[in-house]
Structures are given as structure tokens and as C-alpha cells.
Image (tube, rainbow, N blue to C red):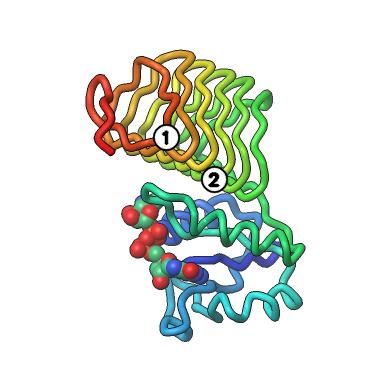
Amino acid sequence: MKKELILIGGGGHCRSCIDVIEKENTYRIAGIVDKRGKVGTRVLAYEILASDEELDTLAGEHKTFFITIGQIKSGSKRKELFEKLKALGVEIPVIISPLADVSKHARIQEGTIVMHGAHVNAGAEIGKNCIINTCAIIEHDCKVGDHCHISTGSILNGECLVGEGAFIGSNCVLSNNIVIAGNSVIGAGSVVIRRIDEAGTYVGNPVRRIL
Ligand code: JB2
């Protein structure tokens, strides 16, 4: 019998996650938690059952939860929800698309989703509550901290180190061995060829700091 799973956040990222979860076929989605005003509406085939205010009650009824709010720039909302779920003592799984390719020598921690077409190579370590989005490439021995979003089609070449809470926009390229300071935002299409030690917003080829 499939395990029941409650999703937190019912927007665009949730719809993408639902496709991964359905194809992965381990969990039965029992419903979604979103803002109070959305309770009773549906996301694809699934009902919004409750709001965050009812998480305590839901945690008494369900064992397994997964955060499906996306992360554009700041990961603070996802981090806050993750900490709330941990405090409630529920299970937060790793979800890996059957269309992704994850090395058996890679390590991925709870709450992280690896979406369709992504590759995670040998020796890579991905922290908690991350989004490794569609077709992203995490090459050998990279380390991605907790609460990061590596967006669609981005490439982290070998041995990169991405600090906690960072956002790497779509289609970025990080050369080998690049360090990205935690909570940095790297704009879509950027190319990073030198380490970034100070958190900030960076764009371009090669990237320059804009904020
Ligand atoms: O505090 C909250 C909360 N704040 C917003 N708790 C809960 N449970 N839900 C919350 N939400 C809900 O998250 C909103 O009501 C809405 O249903 C959803 C956010 O949806 P949206 O489509 O605006 O963004 P997203 O985070 O799902 O997706 C963004 O990030 C993805 C990575 C989008 O920009 C996507 O295009 C992108 N792929």
C-alpha cells in the first residue's frame, strides 16, 4: 500500500512536484496545505485540505509531509516551514524523479526533491529541503547546503560548494570548484568563473554584483 503524503503549498512548484510524485509512485497524495482562503479548492486532482494554522492537527493524523512551495530568491519561507515540520516530528522524505539520474555514490538529505531530467553525480552531497529542479546538473563532489534551489537547467561543475539558502537561477553555469556564499542569488543565465564569498545578488557573464 502506498504511503500518504501531505503537500505544503499549492502553486506552480506544487504542480511540478505532483507530476514527479505521481511518476515516482511511492506516495498517495492525501491533500495540500495552503492559505486559509484556498481551502476547499483543488490543485490538479488534489484538494487543499487545510491552512498552516491546522498543521498541528494534521500532524496527529498524517505521518509524512513535503514542502511544495517554490523558492524564487529567498528560501526563508521554505526554511520556516521545514523547521515547523521538524518541530512537529513528522517524516519529510527525499523525492527523486524516476526520470532523474542520481549516482548511488551521491548523498541527498530529507525534504529535497530531484526533479525530472536532473543529474546528480558521484560524491555529490545535497542538503535538506533543496529543490534540484528540472534538468539541473550537479556534477561530482559538489556540496549543496540546506534550503537551496538549483533552478531548471543549471550546471554546477565538479567540486562546487553552494552555501545554505542560495538560489541559482535557471540556466546558470558554475565552473569547477566554485564557492557560492550562503543566501546568494545568482540570476538566470549567469556564468560564475570565480568564487563568491559575500552574499548578494549577482548576474551576467561573468557575474557581477548588482545588490
Ligand atoms: O505560508 C504559506 C504560504 N505562502 C504562500 N503556507 C502555505 N501552506 N502556502 C503558502 N503559499 C502558497 O504557495 C500560495 O497561496 C500559493 O498557492 C503557493 C505559491 O504559488 P506560486 O505559483 O506563486 O509560486 P511557487 O512557489 O509554487 O512557484 C514558484 O517557484 C517555482 C520554483 C514559481 O515562480 C514557479 O514558476 C517556479 N517554478
Determine the residue positioned at 50% across, 30% down.
162
Q: Nearer the viewer, residue 39 or 72?
A: 72
Q: Is residue 1 above or below residue 194?
A: below
Q: Above or below — where is 41 with respect to 7?
A: below
Q: Does the residue tagged 2 have its C-beta within 8 Å of any atom of ligand 1?
A: no
Cβ of mark 1 under 8 Å from ligand 1: the answer is no
Which residue is labeled 1 in the image?
199
For marks 1 and 2, give the CA distance.
15 Å
Q: Nearer the viewer, residue 57 or 117?
A: 57
Quadrant where ligand 1 appears: bottom left
Q: Residue 94 or 179: which is nearer the viewer?
A: 179
When the figure is inspected, residue 145 is found, relative to residue 39, above or below; the finding is above
Q: Nearer the viewer, residue 25 or 190?
A: 190
Is residue 12 visible in the rendered image? The answer is no
Q: Position of residue 185 (x, y in %)?
A: 37, 39
Label 2 belongs to which residue? 147
CB under 8 Å between discs 1 and 2: no
The quarter in which the N terminus is drawn is bottom right
Left or right, 112 with respect to 77, comes to right
Where does residue 103 sit, x and y in percent of width and height? 62, 26
Amino acid type, callout 2: His
Give the image location of residue 168, x and y in percent. Answer: 39, 36
Judging from the image, what secondary structure is the residue with disc 1 in? Answer: loop
Quarter of the view holding residue 83 = bottom right
Q: Residue at x 64, y 27 (%)?
A: 106
> Residue 9's spot in the image, x, y percent?
48, 66
